[in-house]
Amino acid sequence: MGSSSFKAEWGPAICMVLIELFTTGQMLLTKVVVDAGLFVFALLTYRFFIGTVLVVPLAMIFERGKLKELNLKAFIWIFTSALVGFTIPGLYYIGLGDTSPGYAINFYNIIPIATFILAVLFRKEPLNMKSLVGIIKVIGTLICVGGTLVISLYKGKVIHLWPTNIIGYHTKHSGSAYGHHHMRGTILLIISCLSLAVWYTVQAQMLKVFPYKYWSTVATCFVGCIQMAAVGVAMNREKATWELKWNMSLFTIVYSAILNTAAKFVMISWVVTQRGPTYPSMFCAVSVLFTTVLDSLLLGHDLSVGSILGMIMILAGLYSFLYGKRKESAPQSKEQPKDELQPQCEDNIKESGSNV
């Protein structure tokens, strides 16, 4: 009895903290291997291929025989989902190479805000400025956008928290984080996060046409792998670029595929059934904190006044927005009959099922 209550109370929080740790590890490892010369599109191509292989057994067990329902309309939505959810967001890792993990991770926090803005523009979400909740959501959005501008355009005084990094890592592109690559990296980070914001809308529509979370994940990962490979080959056809060796690059690919694709997908699906779809996004601050501290401690990237101020603004805006969203949905959840809760949980899983 005590064990089950502990699982219900703390299980979702523990899962989300682990997921943010996985994300932090991926960010740091990717920065190291990209600086060492690993081709970004090769990394992502292999990651999505391995992710596809890992999710196939789940699809065959839990959704046996459902693949035959895949038709042309569903494939078009899957192709679009892979494009805006995997291929274009691949630019994020180029932006990461141009900047630093502690800088790049902050842009993940603008995804819920960007999703809200797009939903309002396309009239998918109501915006009531006459209510306190509506005002809180708008203020949170503005603060978050302002924080993004601050962290992008203002550097300020550099803060040296430690004398040097503890593992002796030195980037090949010394000084590039705030040099001529900084603006390019920032633009790519923003484009990739905006693409992910569009992806949530596309994903919801895809799952209406093909409502099988495991097979849709397999198909999207596979199509994303093909798209990544096509773009990568067009950019670099050298055989050495695509060769896999027993080194840190291979470890990063396997780590990302297992922990940031398969495990993350399963854990988020379970958390959504326990706490709802808004709950996972509330843990963005955890990955921001982990990545910022470990980026400085392990990789030796200095923090600046602008980056810290922008991070605080983004987090404050994000949580103001999430608070408004929670208050907005609270009356509906209280009035909802108990017999409708289970179908809603299933829908929530479908909506977040392909978030790999």
Image: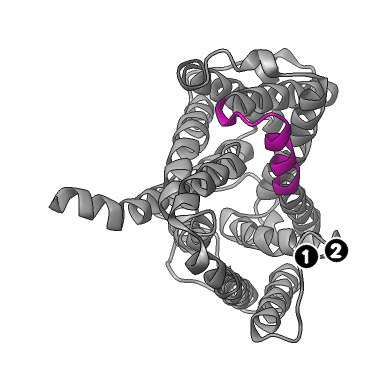
Residue 22 in sight from this viewpoint = yes
Give the image's coloring scheme. Answer: one colour
Q: Nearer the viewer, residue 43 or 240?
A: 43
Q: Nearer the viewer, residue 306 or 143?
A: 143
Residue interval drawn in magenta: 200-214
Residue 162 at what x, y percent from top left? Answer: 42, 67
Q: Residue at x 83, y 62 (%)?
A: 123
Residue 250 at what x, y percent from top left? Answer: 51, 24
Marks 1 and 2 sit apart, C-alpha to C-alpha, by 6 Å
Q: Which residue is mark 1?
A: 117
Q: Which residue is mark 2?
A: 121
Residue 1 higher or lower than 240, as above or below? below
162 lies left or right of 336: left
Tell me if mark 2 has few (under 14), some (14-19) or many (20+) residues whose alpha carbon lies within 10 angstroms of its own.
few
Residue 212 higher or lower than 111, as above or below? above
Residue 204 at what x, y percent from top left? Answer: 69, 43
Q: Nearer the viewer, residue 341 or 138?
A: 341
Residue 115 at what x, y percent from top left? Answer: 72, 58
353 lies left or right of 195: left
Instruction: Answer whether labels 1 and 2 touch (C-beta < 8 Å).
Output: yes
Residue with the most extreme left position: 2
Label 2 residue SS? helix
Q: Residue at x 50, y 51 (%)?
A: 340
Q: Residue type at mark 2?
A: Leu
- Among the 4 quarters of the image, the one containing residue 147: bottom right
Disc on res. 199 = none
Prevailing SS of the magenta stretch? helix
Q: Residue type at mark 1?
A: Ile
Q: Residue at x 51, y 67 (%)?
A: 335
